[in-house]
């Protein structure tokens, strides 16, 4: 969908575009610390500097470019995180994008993040997944492996992987929310111990203990799932 | 226990780098049994690999997010004018109120600060402007007249303060001319020096006329007039004490040539010494001084100017001052007339015995100086008080300076 088509061509829209361009220049500040790569509709990779604080400032004004930059920066990570905990691709997609909607609504109510945007986004994603599990009585979706399979996998290995994933995700859903959270961050998104600690706003030792207990519990629940 | 957490983390990092489970566990034989199932589970968890979102998923959801952003932004833009519309009258009223309060507070404090200023002060124009404003907004004629009289009185008070402080400043005031001693007039009790440069607007000003004076205060306690103009009847004038007016009014019978018409006969007790008419004042314009002695009652004290029985006297160069200066006190004065006709006091005794000013100590003119052959004679005509019948009832009656 053409993004510009979402707006009415009105004086207000023109003002919004002007403001958006202004903020975009801010975002492209030379002091930016992160560079993200985003696939464009044509498949080319767009390299964009990402300055979290400037993006947060733009977010307050619902600045088009700032929100786009935040999305480009975090959507893939959030999507993987949610997919790690929920096997359904469509639901994972909805939840991941819904996190950004919640971000904007929180900003509208002046309750959005002031710092640690990534921590806020993953915490919101975790809550959304927890809500989903509560609504569905922790029943994992059976058809998770369809999107996960790659074309080269043999039928046997695909079945094995599917079964294995199913067993693990069912067991994962038995863990506490915090245990699921830490395992999804470490093994779903591949964050390091330190990165995980920042996202969870905990110290590294606390995360080590948490992940140990999470894995021990997961091991127990996998056994239960297998012998069910 | 924390050791096992640490070992687990080390093992996980090694496995991530490609180490096998067995090789990792070999390094920790004591914890191997406990760690193995946990690490096996971790490896299973790691193998749950989720794919990156496809570009289609990314762009589809990007559009969704940005559409929502556009909606929120539009709602925000629409809500702002609505809120503004609602609050415009309130905001205007609030701003107006704040401005009024600020103006009132600043203006009242400014006016208060200006209220004690004197001519020549920075804030004096504020005081005068505020007075004009007060008069303008007072619609009751009676109140307005009272206010104007109050303001005219304030002018005289300012003059007195200027005299006391010995300050020279541009002043203006109104009053009735009560004495015209050549170039020295008494207007509303204030000595006014009239010179050839004084603009009289080609009008003949006589005693009893209400005038408006513009001039400059002098250190000798008089106002050097720059302009004197007649005022029309009905113009508010300051309230001058009866003593001044009566005494002086009386005077016009004597020296005045032009308007001796009514001498307010009747009431005037203190018709006293008119011993210093122009002729006398001019006569000693030579180097000689004719020292005269005058007794009477102090009617007013303005800085260095003392009025005794209607006679304006300058005490600034007095060689001897006895007693405490006080209005109403009986005094004995010695002095002479200068070239302007102003009586310059050389000695003044406020503690002279007979208070109440009942009677004047008769007058003696000591002509100390040589050549004092003349003065007394001129002033002899001063006892014009004799013609004011009924003056007996007055307190201050009867002073006379006599020349012999």
Image (spheres, coloured by chain):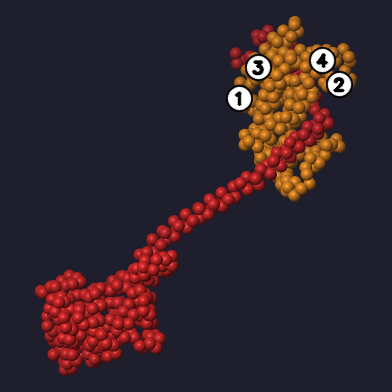
Q: Does any portion of residue B155 appear in the rendered image? A: no
- Closer to the chain start, of discs 1 and 4, is 4
| Circle nearer the viewer, 1 or 2 | 2
Chain identity for the colour orange used in the image: A
Chain designation of label 1: A
User: In the figure, what tint was chain B given?
Assistant: red
Chain designation of label 4: A
Q: Secondary structure at mark 4?
A: helix
Q: Secondary structure at mark 2?
A: loop
- The x, y position of residue A104, in whole percent, is 69, 35
Q: Are marks 1 and 2 in contact (CB under 8 Å)?
A: no
Which quarter of the figure is the N terminus of chain A placed in? top right
Q: Are marks 2 and 3 in contact (CB under 8 Å)?
A: no
| Distance between the alpha carbons at the discs numbered 1 and 4 | 35 Å
Between residue B177 and residue A92, name the one nearer to us: B177
Instruction: Residue B125: name its quadrant.
Output: bottom left
Between residue B191 and residue A80, name the one nearer to us: B191
Between residue A18 and residue B155, name the one nearer to us: B155
| B212 horizontally vs A27: left or right | left
Q: Are marks 3 and 4 in contact (CB under 8 Å)?
A: no
| Distance between the alpha carbons at the discs numbered 2 and 4 | 12 Å
- Closer to the chain start, of discs 3 and 4, is 4
Q: Which residue is under mark 2?
A: A150
Q: Which residue is under mark 4?
A: A162
| Distance between the alpha carbons at the discs numbered 3 and 1 | 19 Å
């Amino acid at each position: 969908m053409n993004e510009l088509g979402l707006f009415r061509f009105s004086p207000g829209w023109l003002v919004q575009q002007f403001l958006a361009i202004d903020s975009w220049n801010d975002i492209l500040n030379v002091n930016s610390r992160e560079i993200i790569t985003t696939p464009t509709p044509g498949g080319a990779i767009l390299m964009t500097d990402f300055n979290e604080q400037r993006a947060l400032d733009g977010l307050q004004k619902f600045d088009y470019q700032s929100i786009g930059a935040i999305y480009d920066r975090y959507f893939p990570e959030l999507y993987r995180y949610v997919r790690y905990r929920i096997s359904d691709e469509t639901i994972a997609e909805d939840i991941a994008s819904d996190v950004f909607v919640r971000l904007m609504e929180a900003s509208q109510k002046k309750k959005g993040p002031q710092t640690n945007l990534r921590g806020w986004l993953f915490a919101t994603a975790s809550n959304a997944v927890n809500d989903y599990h509560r609504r569905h009585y922790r029943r994992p979706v059976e058809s998770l492996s369809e999107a996960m399979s790659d074309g080269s996998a043999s039928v046997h290995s695909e079945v094995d992987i599917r079964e294995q994933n199913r067993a693990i995700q069912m067991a994962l859903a038995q863990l506490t929310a915090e245990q699921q959270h830490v395992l999804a961050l470490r093994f779903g998104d591949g964050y390091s111990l330190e990165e995980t600690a920042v996202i969870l706003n905990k110290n590294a030792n606390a995360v080590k203990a948490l992940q140990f207990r999470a894995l021990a519990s997961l091991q127990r629940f996998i056994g239960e799932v297998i012998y069910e | 226990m924390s050791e096992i957490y640490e070992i687990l983390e080390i093992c996980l990092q090694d496995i991530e780098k490609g180490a096998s489970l067995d090789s990792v566990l070999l390094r920790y034989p004591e914890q191997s049994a406990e760690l193995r199932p946990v690490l096996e589970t971790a490896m299973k968890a790691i193998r749950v690999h989720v794919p990156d979102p496809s570009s289609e998923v990314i762009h589809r959801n990007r559009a969704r997010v940005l559409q929502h952003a556009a909606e929120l932004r539009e709602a925000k833009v629409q809500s702002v004018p609505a809120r503004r519309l609602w609050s415009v009258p309130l905001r205007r009223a609030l701003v107006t109120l704040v401005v009024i309060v600020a103006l009132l507070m600043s203006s009242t404090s400014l006016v208060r600060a200006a209220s004690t200023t004197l001519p020549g002060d920075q804030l004096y124009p504020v005081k005068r402007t505020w007075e004009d404003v007060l008069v303008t907004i007072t619609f009751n004629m009676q109140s307005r007249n009272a206010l104007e009289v109050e303001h005219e009185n304030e002018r005289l008070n300012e003059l007195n303060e200027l005299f006391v402080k010995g300050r020279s400043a541009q002043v203006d005031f109104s009053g009735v001319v009560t004495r015209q001693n050549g170039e020295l007039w008494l207007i509303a009790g204030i000595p006014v020096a009239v010179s050839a440069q004084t603009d009289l607007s080609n009008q003949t000003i006589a005693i009893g006329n209400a005038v408006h004076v513009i001039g400059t205060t002098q250190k000798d306690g008089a106002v050097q007039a720059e302009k004197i103009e007649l005022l029309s009847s009905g113009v508010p004038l300051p309230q001058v004490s009866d003593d001044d007016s009566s005494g002086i009014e009386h005077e016009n019978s004597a020296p005045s040539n032009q308007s001796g018409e009514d001498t307010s006969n009747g009431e005037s007790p203190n018709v006293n010494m008119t011993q210093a008419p122009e002729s006398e004042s001019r006569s000693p314009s030579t180097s000689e001084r004719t020292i005269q002695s005058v007794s009477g009652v102090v009617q007013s004290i303005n800085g260095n100017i003392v009025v005794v029985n209607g006679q304006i006297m300058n005490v600034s160069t007095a060689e001897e001052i006895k007693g405490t200066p006080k209005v109403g006190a009986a005094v004995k004065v010695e002095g002479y007339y200068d070239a302007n006709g102003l009586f310059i006091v050389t000695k003044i005794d406020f503690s002279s015995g007979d208070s109440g000013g009942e009677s004047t100590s008769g007058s003696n003119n000591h002509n100390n100086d040589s050549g004092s052959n003349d003065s007394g004679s001129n002033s002899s005509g001063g006892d014009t008080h004799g013609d004011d019948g009924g003056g007996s009832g007055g307190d201050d009656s009867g002073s006379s300076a006599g020349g012999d």
